[in-house]
Amino acid sequence: MKALCWHGKKDIRFDTVPDPTIEHPRDAIIKVSSCAICGSDLHLYDGFMPGMERGDIMGHEFMGEVVEVGAENKRLKVGDRVVVPFTIICGECDQCRRGNFSVCERSNRKKDLADKAFGHSTAGLFGYTHLTGGYAGGQAEYVRVPFADVAPVKVPSTLSDEQVLFLGDIFPTGWQAAAQCEIEPTDTVAIWGAGPVGQFAIRSAILMGARQVIAIDRLPERLSMAAAAGAITINFEEESVVERLNELTAGKGPEKCIDAVGLESHATRSLDAIYDRAKQATMMETDRPHVLREMMYVCRPAGILSIPGVYGGLLDKIPFGAAMNKGLTIRMGQTHVNRWTDDLLQRIEEGQIDPSFVVTHTAPLSSGPEMYKTFRDKHDGCVKVVLKPGHA
């Protein structure tokens, strides 16, 4: 089969690789109908996440048709149309029973490696580093899904791929980011990053009843998409984020702040940018935490910081004293996808939201290497890329 494979920094190739096979009786094989490039994939593309090996198959946002099931998989049958969450879950461990699916205790098959890096292992993830299990990803024609009798979400034929594909990651991620904020009707919610996750966090915060939602970014197409949803926008290259937030909140600061950017954040001041890039270059920090610094500074005392943006390693110059003395609550983590999918699928079916709004580019899987560059550099107004295996 064909797949997009990692061969090093900024080197994604459309390779021929072996077809996946059933390895465990609970497995299923999925023929991929649509997959997507995620902002988290760019951390691998840009070389910021450790644990990648040449030839690893990329991608963790995918869906398709079940073409084979293991003997113990009684939930799925051949022909089922499913979206596959990016978190691999067993459904049986203590964390899964609590709904903490992104920290499943059994699905990371590289547990010893992850324990050394993180102290305790997280769940296995599709198409990510060997710290999260080294599983083959979904930017491919076929995928083996472990524990496939638990996580895959069956979706109706009445909805398009583009309407349901993002149930596997960015829609639940944006929703969880907002849910972690415990939004009240009087709240201002400020969201750094109006990329795909930020767009879903914006719409989730609005659906949850926030008084005002503010989107912070620098790209006109992203800011326009946020404004279309009803958000107030701030272009951080044209005005001071701190001053504008103070204007919009009568000097009190937003009650809730969401970091939908993660480890590759851009600084609004050149000295911050120079500092973080220099520290990265000398391996004195791995991640650029400018957004975290700014959120800790501007958030209203007793507020909440929600962090869906991915961080991979070590941060520097974090104003933790400010966060502590202001009594801020910090919530973060990979998404517990299956905690939210039933509710979100129902919202799609009822027409509360059509997730396809975020798609700006559709291309065949063979164009994946070029589309990684387009997505990474935000060329041609690119916000979200959907790839179609089998299309010319």
Image: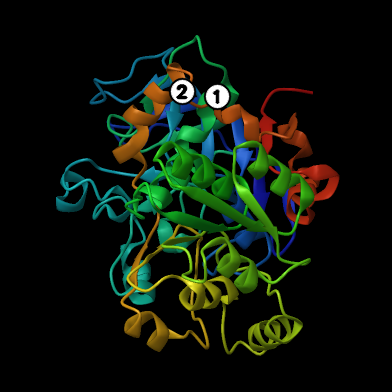
Residue closest to the eye, 258 or 43: 258
Image quadrant in which the C terminus is located: top right
**Labelled disc at residue 163:** 1
Residue 15, by quadrant, is top right
Instruction: Choose between 309 and 145: the one closer to the eye.
Output: 309
Q: CA distance from mark 1 to mark 2?
A: 7 Å
Q: Are marks 1 and 2 in contact (CB under 8 Å)?
A: yes
Please give the label number shown on residue 134: none
Q: Quadrant of the N terminus?
A: top right
Rate crowding at label 2 as few (under 14), some (14 to 19) or many (20 or more) other CA atoms within 10 Å. Answer: some
What secondary structure is marked by label 1?
helix
Q: Secondary structure at mark 2?
A: helix
Picture residue at 36% right of the left edge, 61% below the top: 110
| Numbered disc in front, either 1 or 2 | 2
Of the residues shown, which amino acid type is indicated by label 2? Ile
Q: Residue at x 30, y 75 (%)?
A: 119
Query: Residue 325, can we see it?
Result: yes
Q: Residue at x 48, y 26 (%)?
A: 30
Q: Quadrant of residue 307?
A: bottom left
- Which one is nearer the viewer's eye here, 329 or 355? 329
Please state the horizontal and vertical placement of residue 365, each as a whole percent of the image. Answer: 71, 34
Let me know if residue 20 appears in the view: no
Question: Where 157 sits versus 104, above or below?
Answer: above
Q: Which residue reaches farthest top? A: 158
Look at label 1 and name its amino acid: Gln
Q: Which residue is mark 2?
A: 348
Query: Vertically, is 391 above or below 195?
Result: above
Q: Image check: 316 left or right of 121?
A: right
Place of residue 89 in the rendered image (x, y in percent of width and height, measured from the top left): 30, 44
Say above or below: 127 vs 280.
above
Within 10 angstroms of label 1, few (less than 14), some, or many (20 or more) residues? some
Display coloring:
rainbow
